[in-house]
Amino acid sequence: MAQNGEQSAAMFPKLDEAQIARLTRLGEERNVAAGEIIFDQGDAEHGVFIVLTGSIELINLSNGQEATLMIHGPGNFTGEVNQLSGRRSLVRCRAHEAGKLLEISRANLQRVMQDDTELGEVFLRAFILRRVYLITHSVGDAVLIGSSNSADTLRLRGFLSRNGHPFTYVDVEQDADVQTMLDHFEVRVADIPVLICRGELVLRNPSNAEAADCFGLNAGIDEREVYDLIVVGAGPSGLAAAVYGASEGLNVLVVESNAPGGQAGSSSKIENYLGFPMGISGQDLAARAFVQAEKFGAHIAVARSAAALKCARTPYVLQMNDGGTVQSRSIIVATGVQYRRLDLANLAQFEGAGVYYGATQVEAQVCRDQEVAIVGGGNSAGQAAIFLSTVAKHVYLLVRGPGLSETMSRYLISRIEACPEITVKTFTEIEALEGDGHLQRAHWRDSRTGERRTCDIQHLFLMTGAAPNTAWLEGCVALDPKQFIKTGIGAGTEWPLSRPPYLLETSRPGIFAVGDVRAGSLKRVAAAVGEGSMAVQFVHKVLAE
Ligand SMILES: Cc1cc2nc3c(=O)[nH]c(=O)nc-3n(C[C@H](O)[C@H](O)[C@H](O)COP(=O)(O)OP(=O)(O)OC[C@H]3O[C@@H](n4cnc5c(N)ncnc54)[C@H](O)[C@@H]3O)c2cc1C
């Protein structure tokens, strides 16, 4: 691993004698022989190993080939972000020389994180830097073979990226050596996207849940437990609830249908969130919050959706889309909203193959140096326009109304006006899409003049308002006419207790709603984070009743 000195010291710190002494009472010593495998790529059931004497080697395994990443000597330790969640290891670890190791179990590591500020910081910093290294250098157990024209390829790339899982991407359209790899795993080009998981298992066009399963992204989650709190949705509001809940000692499970980050995760740059004057990408913000939640011991299940809630009595039973159930004494609903789809006959055919609902690095790579169109006049459309103008040849921003001033923040409008790569087309509506497999043309119409235009556009971003994700709550909590969840005093007429509902509590005691899914919420990251954090205070009160 080539690193500069400072980076290397932070990524591979050496614990001093006093620090090791503090850890000794929490760990178990173990002698290892030279060449002994300490843990393998794909293993989950091990702790962090601190080298006391001798040395160990960290190895990347790719297509059965070994490559040494690092040799750790006395004072160095193993582990990266996966260690906090109990997910599988991305690398192999072998004793380079005979020696003695100290193993700290995952449970004890979590105690260190919470009780020992100095050591907690050393571990956390090293773990995060190592994960960033693994992602940027595609080290690990995943190879995705796909095509830039395939919607499922885009879905899987997005899923792995947003879950921070390192992978090597091979594009059949661009890489001449791909056939050799496909032959090696006996797959036909027609099977793509193909995911090679842990060097062996080949998944042909897997669902997100299958990919999560294969990489053990949900390892370490106990479904038999009755949780203090289940948070449904891991957008900003759900992640905030998880951080506050877990840090205050609650046993918290988060259930997320895709990956942490929610809508914010699809934003290239959030500039108005307090504390980030230079802006932060939604994915970075989510990745930090995810590690923070895991540091405090929250369990986060990804690629699993809440399908229904049995809410007649406590503990409440959450039914998942895969048939599993989990129980909890309280629930925070943080399922946010999803973009409205345009009413176009063949829209579904182009989703992921020219039509997108988020503008992140993954989509940007696909439309580099090409013309793109964005539909929508809100802040998310404005951000996407500015972000995509840095990579695309030209950006058309299509708005139904007379301009942007009513719907978009002033700072975004100014930047759009100053950017020659963006053209705003007012009074414009998309009428039809055309293409063979991938979007090739869009037809739009000027609603004032009736003039119609056909544009050779292969990438269309739809950012046109949103509807709440509340269908799974049917019959459990009161909703407003637009299906957002009512909370607090006005939550509903069927409130069963003598005390009034707490702020953010729904019409069902112990079930709270936060963030964009809540009726009357502000639809901003800061508001979502604030509500997620606040709700935990009321969860404590409910649990004490
Ligand atoms: C492109 C874009 C740019 C934005 N830019 C900004 C900005 O610059 N500043 C700002 O303040 N705000 C911005 N916003 C708005 C901000 O992102 C939202 O207000 C915020 O994300 C709301 O957070 P949330 O947690 O309430 O919901 P969401 O972010 O919508 O998250 C909800 C989560 O719940 C999950 N989910 C849904 N249904 C289920 C289910 N049944 N089971 C399990 N999980 C489920 C979803 O997958 C999702 O991860 C932007 C939004 C977008 C789309």
Image (spheres, helix red, strand yellow):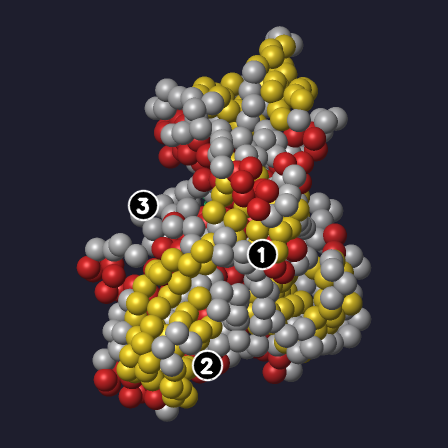
Name the quadrant of the N terminus: bottom left
Residue 323 position within the rendered picture, expressed as x and y whole percent measured from the top left: 77, 63
Q: What residue is drawn where x is 53% and y is 24%?
A: 373
The answer to whether residue 267 is above or below residue 459 is below
- Of marks 3 and 1, which one's residue comes earlier in the chain? 1
Relative depth, front residue between 151 and 385: 151
- Of marks 2 and 3, which one's residue comes earlier in the chain? 2
**Type of amino acid under label 1:** Glu
What residue is pinned by disc 2? 105
What residue is pinned by disc 3? 278
Residues tagged 3 and 1 counted as in contact (Cβ below 8 A):
no
Q: Is mark 3 within 8 Å of ligand 1?
A: no
Instruction: Give left or right: position of 337 versus 247.
Output: right
Mark 2 or 3: in front is: 2
Q: Quadrant of residue 153?
A: top right
Residue 17 position within the rendered picture, expressed as x and y whole percent measured from the top left: 23, 84
What residue is pinned by disc 1? 200
Residue 55 position within the rendered picture, expressed as x and y whole percent measured from the top left: 30, 75
Residue 390 position within the rendered picture, expressed as x and y whole percent measured from the top left: 38, 30
Numbered badge on residue 482: none
**Element carrying mark 1:** loop
The local crowd at label 1, few if under 14, some if 14 to 19, many if 20 or more residues have their Cα within 10 Å, is: some
**Type of amino acid under label 3:** Met
Relative depth, front residue between 73 and 117: 73
Q: What residue is drawn where x is 28% and y is 82%?
A: 53
Mark 1 or 2: in front is: 1
The local crowd at label 3, few if under 14, some if 14 to 19, many if 20 or more residues have their Cα within 10 Å, is: few
**Element carrying mark 3:** loop
Name the quadrant of the C terminus: bottom right
Q: Is residue 237 visible?
A: no
Cα separation, mark 3 vs mark 1, equals 42 Å
